[in-house]
Image: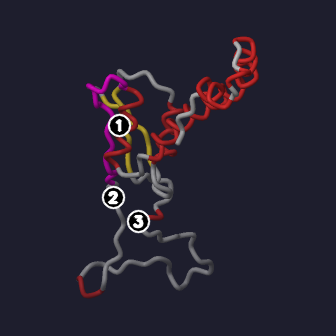
Amino acid sequence: MFNINFDKLIDDLLPWFLSKPVMLAWLQALLSPVSSLYDSFLSLRDVKLYEARYNGQVAELEYVLNDFYYSDGTLRRIYIDDNIEAGEIYLYNVAENEEETYIYNVEETTEPETYIFNSSESAGGSDFIVFVPDTLVYDSDYLTSLVKKYKIAGPAFTIQTYAE
C-alpha cells in the first residue's frame, strides 16, 4: 500500500506518443516535491511504528532504553527496579496490644496538618528507579523524556547511576 515508484507511475500513465525524454524529465521534476514528501512520510512511518510497538511494561521499557543507548545490542546495562521505601508509618488496632496512636489530641484547639496517604499517593516518592551505569554519558533531560514517553501514565520514577 505504501510502495509507490513515481518514475514507474509517470511511465505507466503517460501515453506512448508523449513519452519523450524531455517530457519524462519535466514530469519527474514536477513530481520531485511529492517524492520528497513521500520519503519523509515513509521515514516518519517507520519511527512511529517502532514507538507503537512498545508499551509501558518494565521489560519493554528496559529494551527501548538499552536499544537507544547501546545500539549494537550486545550491552544491556540499563535496568529498572521497584523502589522499596523504608520506614513506613503504621496505625495499630487496639487488639494488637500496641500503644495508642494519636493523630491529634482532643484538647488541641486546631487540627494538625497531618495527611494520611495511600501507598500509591506517596508524596514526592517514586514507584520505580531507572539504574544507569556511571560510565554511560547521557543527557538526563532526554533520558527523562524518553522514559516518560514509553512508561504508563501515573507512576513516578527517579534515575540513579550505579558503579559497574
Real-space Cα separation, disc 1 to disc 3, in angstroms: 22 Å
- Expressed as whole percent of the image width and height from the top left, the position of residue 5 reads 57, 28
Q: Mark 1 or 3, which is nearer the eye?
A: 1
**Residue at the spot x=32%, y=22% of the render?**
72
Q: What is the secondary structure assignment of the residue under circle 3?
A: helix
- Expressed as whole percent of the image width and height from the top left, the position of residue 44 reads 57, 35
The label shown at residue 87 is 2
**Residue at the spot x=47%, y=52% of the render?**
156
Q: Is residue 137 magenta?
A: no
**Residue at the spot x=71%, y=25% of the render?**
31
Q: Mark 1 points at which residue?
A: 131
The answer to which image quadrant residue 127 occupies is: bottom left
Residue type at mark 3 is Ser
Q: Report whether 75 appears left or right of 4.
A: left
What's drawn in magenta, residue-wise?
70-84
Question: Which sits earlier in the primary sequence, circle 1 or circle 3?
Answer: 3
Q: How many labels does the image show?
A: 3
Q: Mark 2 or 1, which is nearer the eye?
A: 1
Q: Name the residue under label 3.
A: 119
Question: Which sits earlier in the primary sequence, circle 2 or circle 1?
Answer: 2
Pick the residue in front: 129 or 73.
73
- Expressed as whole percent of the image width and height from the top left, the position of residue 59 reads 31, 46
Question: Which sits earlier in the primary sequence, circle 2 or circle 3?
Answer: 2
Pick the residue in front: 13 or 6.
13
